Image (spheres, rainbow, N blue to C red):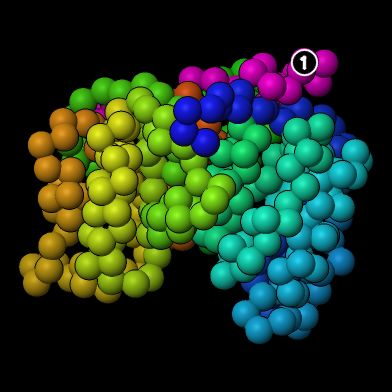
Amino acid sequence: MTGSALPQLLRPRALGPGDLVVIASLSGPLPAAREPNVEQTVAVFERMGFRVRRAPLLEAGRRHWWSAAPPAEIAGELNALLRDLEVRAIVASDGGQTALGYLDLIDVEAIRADPKPILGYSDISLLHLVLHARTGLVGFHADMAVPGFGGHWQCAPAPRRAELAALYSRLLTGPEAIGALPAGPSWKCWRPGRAEGPLIGGVLNRIVLAQATPYALALERFDGAVLFWEEAGGLASHVWSYLQVLRHSGILDRIAGMVVGVPHGIGGLDPGASPTLREIVLDVLGDRDIPVLGNVDFGHAGPNLPMPVGIRAGLDARRRTLSLLEPAVRPAGATAAGS
């Protein structure tokens, strides 16, 4: 895409009371033990005032290898949801290892004709990045049914659940900027400074994988961006290597700031015996003087603060603030592109 016009930002239409939200298997299968997570997710969105339906592939025990179904079958169901004018938002049931198998099968014209929020993280990061690259779609790096809405949310204190529900409802229904996201005690200034630019990111390894496909984000998309990422599993050395890939590709030379999520299950981050995540990040950044805010509560550690891909954000690492400066959705009567 380098040298060609970049797609305009494509915002979905704001949801209204009674709109239909569909929970769908976009990657991994639904184990029977996780069925209660889906039921809890239905309740979360019904309390927000939406109707909720489950897509047919979201059936406990259904699986094909490590996926809910073969990639072409998942793509077929996703495309049907994208073309269905009654469906106003799609919530991924879980992450997994499947999205790479159907990136080339997604009906991007249906997205351009009727953009709608797709919520999810982990493997769903690939969808957000690739669809943003191809259409400008604002992707919602946000909680899923398993374990997010149906798990992490249920374990959070009641005030936190209420805060998250109000935040997600405003994000999906209100065509106004959210402003400052609710900061948590884990947030740390790893390098001071301020930045303002579009949020681009997801799971770190998925960013690297997306950039290795024909549907990669043009490097210009990273100009002045606030790069957000989190990582789960693997080793600390893998994180260092993925960041080195972003350095070699020139991405780290283009971004204006970085936001790092709480790490989850990463081996080799043992206190005192290994480098910290902060040390790894600053080692790879070298003398690039950009603000870095660490341990922000999004990603696999959950529950997730939503990070809308493509939306302009303001970062002040010293003050430990991250603000969404634009709405993620458009008013019902506005045009989608650039609105």
Residue name at image x 28 percent, y 71 percent: 235
> How many residues crowd around disc 1 within 10 Å: few (fewer than 14), some, or many (20 or more)?
few
**Percent position of residue 233, x then y:** 38, 70
Seen from the viewer's position, the closer of residues 267 and 338 is 338
Is 300 displayed left or right of 257 in the figure?
right
Seen from the viewer's position, the closer of residues 182 and 298 is 298
Is residue 330 visible in this depiction of the protein? Answer: yes
Q: Quadrant of the C terminus?
A: top right
Residue name at image x 66 percent, y 28 percent: 10
* 83 over 255 or under it: above or below: below
**Percent position of residue 183, x then y:** 38, 36
Is residue 21 visible in this depiction of the protein? Answer: no
Q: Is residue 151 magenta?
A: no
- Mark 1 residue element: loop
* 226 over 278 or under it: above or below: above
Circle 1: residue type: Ala
Residue 190 picture quarter: top left
Seen from the viewer's position, the closer of residues 264 and 279 is 279
**Percent position of residue 305, x then y:** 50, 43
Main SS type for the magenta part? loop
Is 231 displayed left or right of 154 in the figure?
left
**Percent position of residue 151, x then y:** 59, 63
Region in magenta:
314-339
The mark tally for this picture is 1
Residue 70 picture quarter: bottom right
Q: Is residue 333 magenta?
A: yes
Is 236 displayed left or right of 289 in the figure?
right
Residue position marked by numbered label 1 in the rendering: 334
Residue name at image x 32 percent, y 32 percent: 255
Seen from the viewer's position, the closer of residues 338 and 13 is 338
Residue name at image x 81 percent, y 21 percent: 332
